[in-house]
Image (cartoon, rainbow, N blue to C red):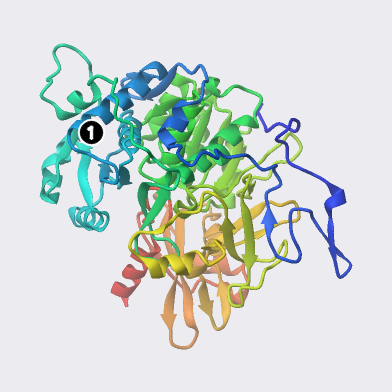
Amino acid sequence: MATFLKTHGNSKVEKNPSKTHYQNGKSFPFWYNVETGIYSSKYPSIKLPENPFVDVVSFIFSHKHGGVKALVDSISGISISYSEIYPMVKSMANGLHQKGVKQGDVVLILLPNSIYFPVILLSVLSLGAIVTTMNPFSSLFEIKKQALDCGVTLAFTINDKVDKLSTLGVPVIGVPEILVFSSHYSESSDFYELISRNPKWDFKPKISQQDTAAILYSSGTTGAGKGVILTHGNFIAMMELFVRFEASQYEYLSIENVYLAVVPMFHVYGLSLFVMGLLSLGTTVVVMRKFNADEMVKAIEKYGVTHFPIVPPLLMALTRRAKDGAWSSMKSLKQVSCGAAPVSTKSIEDFVRSLPNVDFIQGYGMTESTGIATRGYNTEKLHNYSSVGLLAPNMQAKVVDWITSSPLPPNCMGELWLCGPGVMKGYLNNVEATKSTIDGNGWLHTGDIAYFDEEGYLYVIDRLKEIIKYKGFQIAPADLEAVLVSHPDIIDAAVTGARDEEAGEIPVAFVAKRDGRELSQADVIDFVSKQVAPYKKIRRVYFRASIPRSAAGKILRKELRNLLTSKL
């Protein structure tokens, strides 16, 4: 049976009918302020460290938990224990300091998931240096652009890409897939020398919570990639309000949990969980270097995985394996959490039917909020699978009319604004983009269309910039995508707007159909038209082998629009 959240204890969700607000004879819940339009967390506030000079690495390793294995490579089984990881971090920090890495320097990590990823990142941060991460599949052009933008002075990448990165004009350190410590290992390796140095070092920089810890790149709310400046304080808040708080809601001990890390560590989702947060809890993280559905099932069974944070494409892969009979190998699973991109109702329903004893939740956060915003909440009596959850402690929100910016009450859709200790410092070298995203009162304008229901659960509908405007009507692509993937012969779909002289824009669908299935454009258009208002009908359909998505599972609509341009 699935293990749900506690319904007792000091951190339970507050329910206080006496705090109900009234306006014009209508009642509003205590967590919504009618006068200001502010939604507050239903959870009690959490006290964050007051000392201004607390760095995130010291904060992680200040927690006593009794954990044994910290990081395990899913293929080889080679692991780093909790007794080894902090000495490794200090050893590498010592080595980097000797190489001249100093406070304020920017270090690029261009790696797939690896048991060494957290060691590298935390060692850099412990020096007061700054980390910037990238997808290891990035082109050399993209790498050079980001490296130049944030002033990279050192880079880590896999051994095969060292030569490729040498053109950056900075030192590059190759990282092996697995490092076997033995007398036969070549000590000429820079990485070996760094990780095996004496961890006893006296150098300890004075790091402020307001100091920059990472520059992570995001398309934000205006399209082009921008460097999101996140501080040590942002990451400390992320751990306390997201990872550690959620763990406190369960009956079982964190050191008994085993998480499977498939979500990329270079993304704020994976970085928050696997590289930082879970290490403060003593939890075991099983790391998959690259995704493979069969290896995923094997890892769940072999290591007794209890928690699996995923993105929508992984959810569908997990469901397919369960339907094919692999559910018997997944009996250890307690919870699957999905985030980083919208997930369709059909995908959720398929998963819940296939693995009914596994708790399914969604979460919402942005790179600009250090991944903090909401988290799913299920109990024995309430299963709310479609919502992205309740506001995290210490977080506030507004839902505003995207034209007038007037605040909206529960059950009204508008643009979501967030405020809290996870909100970024700003965009790197981009004052205008920062001002347009964070207003003078500290509200982060997410660019997402959302609403809160009468119980405080948040529902994210679509991106404001993706809205299709057809003859004055507004159409959310996600609504049409949910209808499309409910067709038995469609495995994935995406919708975007195409220019039209008469209508302004029309909805166009890109569809990936099941192998061997006959499906025409007319079939798809007719299927959708029977389930939506006339103005929402799909006007054109293009069939593709797959839908372009980011590593986090988000539809790459820019690529779709480029495809449309090439077809016109």
Residue identifier under label 1: 97
**x 14%, y 50%: residue:** 168
The secondary structure type at the circle numbered 1 is helix
**x 41%, y 24%: residue:** 298
Residue that protrudes farthest toward the top in the picture: 183
Nearer the observer, 314 or 514:
314
- Quarter of the figure with the N terminus: top right
Nearer the observer, 96 or 118:
96
- Quarter of the figure with the C terminus: bottom left
Quadrant in the rendering for residue 487: bottom right
Residue that protrudes farthest toward the bottom in the picture: 502
Quadrant in the rendering for residue 142: bottom left
Tell me, yes or no, if residue 489 can be seen here.
Answer: no
Tell me, yes or no, if residue 536 can be seen here.
Answer: yes
- Looking at the picture, how far across and down is residue 129, in whole percent? 30, 42
**x 10%, y 42%: residue:** 163
Disc 1 marks a residue whose amino acid type is: His
- Looking at the picture, how far across and down is residue 154, in whole percent? 20, 43
Quadrant in the rendering for residue 290: top left
- 261 horizontally vs 251: left or right: left
Nearer the observer, 64 or 562:
64
- Looking at the picture, how far across and down is residue 520, in whole percent? 44, 64
